[in-house]
Image (tube, coloured by chain):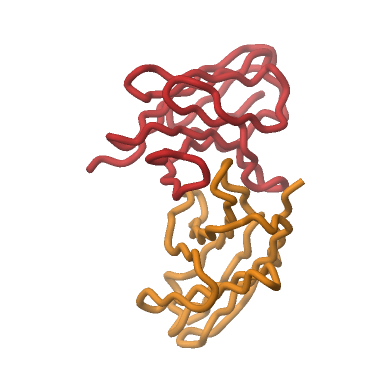
Chain colours: A orange, B red
Amino acid sequence: QKEVEQNSGPLSVPEGAIASLNCTYSDRGSQSFFWYRQYSGKSPELIMFIYSNGDKEDGRFTAQLNKASQYVSLLIRDSQPSDSATYLCAPSSGYSTLTFGKGTMLLVSP
Amino acid sequence: KAGVTQTPRYLIKTRGQQVTLSCSPISGHRSVSWYQQTPGQGLQFLFEYFSETQRNKGNFPGRFSGRQFSNSRSEMNVSTLELGDSALYLCASSLLGQGGEQYFGPGTRLTVT
């Protein structure tokens, strides 16, 4: 049984701060890692993916992967109220479908 | 390029009825996956279709079924609806599936009364 663990939150940060969202996974065969953002009442939107250990940066977003620790995180720098959403982590082994965590709710206060 | 479309967007049905939901993937994408999302359970995988064949299936009862057509459009059917089937049903398309990046449609909100 593949498991993906995320703190449900809410994670509350003030505007301009760094938000750190974490995800652990059980499947050691996971090779690709996807982060989705889901606004309330909307469908998930792909925002980042990472394949290699280390960091991957895209604008204000940085994904960090540590396969040995089975841990992937998403950092959001200079958080904005528009970043308030639920963030879903989805590891993939490349052989079957994505397994989604239940997500972490992020609240950015102005 | 047009995104994933789903119809209808909202649906209200009565317990015991059946329902069919439709999904049109991004042009060129051959994999379509279906998910059920509820507040308590999060995103739960229903099934994945690739080139008209069901390639993966989640842990849902046989009342949930699907199919994919030659143009990659997909439908899912739920028979004998139960109150617990009330959820947001999401379809996601992927170029090849197999754990690759997926793009979600807007979803169908199903309410069973």
Corner quadrant of residue B61: top right
For image coordinates 37% across by 74% down, the residue present is A58
For image coordinates 65% across by 42% down, the residue present is B38
A44 and A13: which one is in front? A44
Residue A108, position in %: x, y? Answer: 52, 76
A72 and B62: which one is in front? A72
Direction from residue B68 to residue B64 in the image, left or right: right
- Above or below, B91 relative to A70: above
Residue A16, position in %: x, y? Answer: 45, 87
B104 and A69: which one is in front? A69
For image coordinates 60% across by 13% down, the residue present is B18
- Above or below, A4 relative to B81: below
Residue B95, position in %: x, y? Answer: 37, 40
Total label count?
0
B49 and B3: which one is in front? B49
Q: Residue furthest left?
A: B1
- Above or below, B68 relative to B99: above
For image coordinates 63% across by 64% down, the residue present is A104
Residue A45, position in %: x, y? Answer: 43, 54
- Above or below, A13 relative to B47: below
Q: Residue furthest bottom?
A: A17
Q: Residue furthest right?
A: A1
